[in-house]
Image (cartoon, helix red, strand yellow):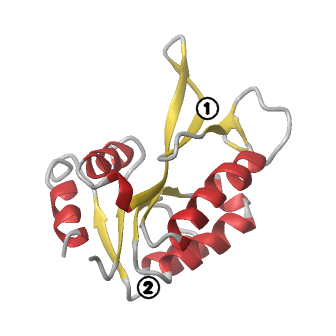
Amino acid sequence: MMRKNILVTGKPGIGKTTAIKSIIEKLDPDSIAGFWSEEIREAGQRVGFAIETLSGKIGTLAHVNLKTGPKVSKYRVNIDDIESIMVPEMEFARESGRVIIIDEIAKMELFSERFSDEVRRCLNTSRVVGTIQLRRDPFLDEIRSRSDVYLFELTTMNRNRIPLQVLELVNV
């Protein structure tokens, strides 16, 4: 079983979520829990981000039509769904001894203190496979600099190879 946290980073749109989903497909569904986020598109335009957990819950991370919540670019962040969907899924993964899938640790999610606290608790298990935003931020820098984190930077050249390398580490 894995003994390190594995995080994938890279520029926006490079394929971090795609990489995580290809890793999830190759793992035993009973050995993992967590979530990923996906773009919400309407008429070809990105209007927000959805949350989907491995246990089947769906929510909204951020959307242009939300009236309340912290603003990031043109989106408002939905702290309620972060705290009622993402955080409980992470707690379940941590408490059940599963590999913890976190996509992604980034600016929007970090508006929830409960989210950042749970990220730290999950990382302390050394069972996290996730993605982390590339930008500089004190919390993100702290996570990336942890001695128990393997960090892979996804590029167009390596994005097909990285999921395989991650899987090798998970299955050690």
Question: Split into 4 quadrants, where in the image is the N terminus?
Answer: bottom left
Identify residue type, mark 2: Arg
Which is more toward the observer, 19 or 31?
31
User: What element does badge 2 sit on?
Assistant: loop
Task: Specify the quadrant of the image occupied by residue 110.
Answer: bottom right
Which is more toward the observer, 90 or 5?
90
Q: Which mark is residue 110?
A: none
Q: Position of residue 79 (x, y in %)?
A: 76, 50
Say which residue appears at 29% left-offset and 55% top-offset: 28
Say which residue appears at 55% left-offset and 72% top-offset: 95
User: What element does badge 1 sit on?
Assistant: strand
Q: Position of residue 22 (x, y in %)?
A: 27, 45
Q: Which residue is mark 1?
A: 48
Task: Specify the quadrant of the image occupied by residue 150.
Answer: bottom left
* Mark with earlier residue (1, 2): 1
Task: Specify the quadrant of the image occupied by residue 118.
Answer: bottom right
| Farthest bottom residue in view | 147
Question: Split into 4 quadrants, where in the image is the C terminus?
Answer: bottom left
Q: Residues within 10 Å of mark 1 (few under 14, many from 20)?
A: many
Residue 3 shown left or right of residue 70 in the figure: left
Up-down relation of residue 101 to residue 18 (above or below) = below
**Label total for image:** 2
Mark 1–mark 2 Cα distance, whole angstroms, equals 31 Å
Q: Position of residue 59 (x, y in %)?
A: 64, 38
Up-down relation of residue 56 to residue 26 (above or below) = above
Say which residue appears at 73% left-offset and 61% top-offset: 112
Residue 89 shown left or right of residue 72 in the figure: left
Q: Residues within 10 Å of mark 2 (few under 14, many from 20)?
A: few
Q: Position of residue 164 (x, y in %)?
A: 16, 57
Q: Which residue is mark 2?
A: 146
| Farthest top residue in view | 43
